[in-house]
Amino acid sequence: MDVRTGADGRARCAWVGDDPEYARYHDEEWGVPLHGDRALFEKLSLEGFQAGLSWITILRKRPRFREVFAGFEPEAVAAFGPDDVERLMADPGIIRNRAKIEATISNARLVQDLEPGELDALMWSFAPASHRRPSTFAEVPATTPASDAMSKALRKRGFRFVGPTTMYALMQSAGMVDDHVDGCWRTEQSVH
């Protein structure tokens, strides 16, 4: 089944299951247009940490990620050094993957070098002008030409952990595409 009715009587995309945090995320964040360099840097970072893991793992750890990564303020994260990497590697409240931690710091430095609003404009430039809502999850792609292009453009600038699948997940979560399936209550709220 592609849609599941929760205890509150609301029909949601079935991936939500019974987890209240997943339901909140689905209802309030997933597919909602997100703008701002800081907000998109956070999303980029968390999607990178998610690679190979379930998104609920990241959601549950997000408060701690925000705490130890200085609210994902690019300027603050860009100033992190080797001692910060070791501090983060020792923190059980986050995903302790050295390559992902170092990529987040490196990516922050790249964002810091951009003009204000440039990251937002760059990422949103890959949002498709039109997107056909999937009827079923079988129709939801892992990548699209737009996510391939976004990945390639970011990698060319030096960003890491920005593969096409990760970028499509970002496009979904940041509302650049709306993949709520037919029958989900959110389809009634969407302007896509």
Image: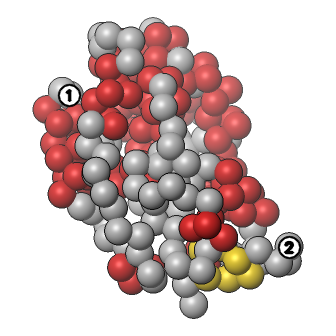
What's the residue at 32%, 10% (across, down)? 115
Position of 101 with respect to 167 (left or right) is right
Identify the image quadrant of residue 23: bottom right
What's the residue at 18%, 27% (across, down)? 157
What's the residue at 41%, 75% (across, down)? 134
Q: Quadrant of the C terminus?
A: bottom left
Numbered tag placed on residue 8 in the rendering:
2
Task: Depth check: give the residue in front, 104 or 26.
Answer: 26
Q: Amino acid at mark 2?
A: Asp
Q: For the residue labelled by badge 2, is the local secondary structure a helix, a strand or a loop?
A: loop
Q: Quadrant of the N terminus?
A: bottom right
Identify the image quadrant of residue 16: bottom right
Residue that carries the numbered disc 1 in the rendered image: 158
Q: For the residue labelled by badge 1, is the local secondary structure a helix, a strand or a loop?
A: loop
Give whichever of discs 1 and 2 has the lower sequence position. Answer: 2
Residue 147, given in percent of the width and then of the height, sits at 26, 52
Numbered tag placed on residue 169 in the rendering:
none
Q: Amino acid at mark 1?
A: Gly
Task: Depth check: give the residue in front, 64 or 131.
Answer: 131
Residue 184, given in percent of the width and then of the height, sits at 61, 74
Classed neighbour count for the residue bearing mark 2: other residues with Cα under 10 Å, few (<14), some (14–19), many (≥20):
few
Work out whether residue 97 can be spotted. no
Picture layout, residue 35 above or below residue 48: above
Q: How is the image coloured?
A: secondary structure
What's the residue at 64%, 41% (across, down)? 62
Picture layout, residue 112 above or below residue 50: above
Residue 12, given in percent of the width and then of the height, sits at 66, 73
Q: CA distance from mark 1 to mark 2?
A: 45 Å
* 1 or 2: mark nearer the eye: 2
Identify the image quadrant of residue 135: bottom left
Residue 114, given in percent of the width and then of the height, sits at 30, 13
Position of 128 with respect to 185 (left or right) is left
